[in-house]
Image (tube, grey):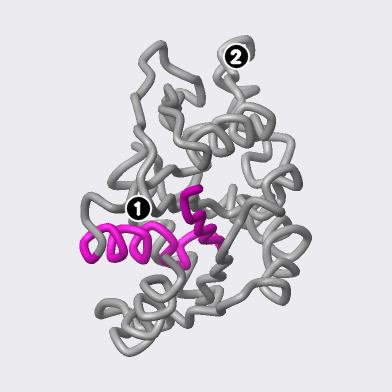
Amino acid sequence: MNYLIAISGGSGAGKTTLSNRLKEIFKEDLVQVTYDSYCVDRSGLTMEERTKVNYDHPTSYDSELFSKQIKALKNGEAIDRPTFDFATHTRTKETVKIHPKKIIVIEGILVLQVKELLDEIDLSIFVDADADLRLARRLLRDIKERGRTPESVVTQYLSTVKPSHYDFIEPSKYDCNIVFNNNKNDGLDEKQVAKLVKMIKKAV
């Protein structure tokens, strides 16, 4: 049975940054799966309707497919991970073949809301950062990587991201095994990384 790590936290907290750092350390022993890839396809809606969807709500994700595929990975089976286009809010036809590894990292703002997976998670990590820093990081990311305008990012943040953070994401922090503080903006705190790596190596 493979070792499953879940990384949660608010949008812009640094979940992907931490996941990528663990990948650098464990290399071919670790595989990453982001919950963002499992957003529900919105191709049946107009573009205007798609922009009004709350993508920070648990119902915006295909939790059934995600839990099924992650369980398969943990049991040593390869999966065909879906691909989501955030510019159009639709699921593309392409899938990505992911093979199981000794360490599986799943990450996403609502990854701990997938109740079917909670018993499968061996280590849960909440990446914590101040709200203003998370907004600044999200703003830069969405403009650069997702083709968004500053106005649309701020509007979405105030209308759905912030409320959903306090309704669904923040409460999960208190049930996590580790709270990783990421208020530095010049790279991860390597002392925390070293402590985390030591814990994982001991477990696997």
Q: From the viewer's perspective, tell me whether residue 27 is left or right of residue 22.
A: left
Numbered mark located on residue 46 in the image? 2
What residue is rendered at 38% in x and 85% in y? 195
The vertical placement of 53 against 203, above or below, is above
Pair 2/1: label in front: 1
Q: From the viewer's perspective, tell me whether residue 13 is left or right of residue 146.
A: right
The vertical placement of 104 against 184, above or below, is above
Is the C terminus in the top left, top right, bottom left or bottom right quadrant?
A: bottom left
Crowd around label 1: few <14 · some 14–19 · many ≥20 (10 Å): some
Compare marks 2 and 1 and give the one earlier in the sequence. 2
41 and 25: which one is in front?
25
Between the residue at mark 2 and the residue at mark 1, the CA separation in whole angstroms equals 24 Å
What residue is rendered at 38% in x and 47% in y? 32
Numbered mark located on residue 181 in the image? none
116 and 113: which one is in front?
116
Tell me the SS state at disc 2.
loop
Tell me the SS state at disc 1.
helix
What residue is rendered at 34% in x and 37% in y? 147
The vertical placement of 122 against 31, above or below, is below
Q: Which residue was labeled with disc 1?
A: 141
Asked if residue 23 lies in the magenta stretch, the reply is yes
**For residue 17, what is the image quadrant?**
bottom left
6 and 188: which one is in front?
6
What residue is rendered at 36% in x and 72% in y? 201
Asked if residue 21 lies in the magenta stretch, the reply is yes
**For residue 26, what is the image quadrant?**
bottom left
Image coords of residue 125 (percent x, y): 54, 69
Q: Residue furthest bottom?
A: 191
In this picture, which residue range is highlighted in magenta? 1-25
